[in-house]
Amino acid sequence: MTIATTPHLNFRGDARAALEFYQSVFGGQLALVRYVDAGAVTDPAEAEQIMWGQVASDAGFRVMAYDVPGHTEWAPGVIPVFVSVRGTDADELTGYWQKLAEGATVVVPLAPAGWSPLYGMLRDRFGVTWVLDLEVPWSPE
């Protein structure tokens, strides 16, 4: 298995604009999943916001971003970045999760999600927020 560590930026309604800007700077492919695409709308006013987005270039640039939903606390500069570990082997990801979880606060348990067969989020004992997920191709309908 290979893994990639990717900066994951958190916004409140600006994720699409930020990712489009980063794509204009670095080139690459832009992928966007809106809350409505994933069936994860908690506020109809936020349905079109980005639940998961990414710019990935052939040169190796990669950044992810999402719009923090209104029901979730968000203070710019407090948790502006997630460390995203995306892999192709569920067992290996689970092993990383178990080690990172020692002394951590689990935000979202490692389990199937609407966009990935395996996804979880935790804040480690040093205060770093980690997102682990199993990489799957995304093709919006």
Image: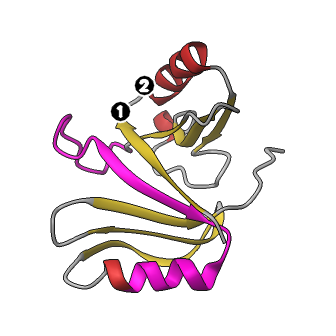
- Percent position of residue 61, x then y: 56, 33
Circle 1 — which element?
loop
- Percent position of residue 3, x then y: 57, 63
The residue to which callout 1 is attached is 12
- Percent position of residue 9, x then y: 39, 39
The residue to which callout 2 is attached is 14
- Name the residue nearer the viewer: 49 or 22: 22
Picture quadrant where residue 33 is located = top right
Q: Residue at x 32, y 44 (%)?
A: 81
Quadrant in which the C terminus is drawn: top right
Query: For the residue marked with disc 1, what is the amino acid?
Result: Arg
In this picture, which residue range is highlighted in magenta? 69-98
Q: Disc 1 versus disc 2: distance between alpha carbons? A: 6 Å
Q: Residue at x 57, y 33 (%)?
A: 48
Q: Residue at x 38, y 54 (%)?
A: 83
Query: For the residue marked with disc 2, what is the amino acid?
Result: Asp
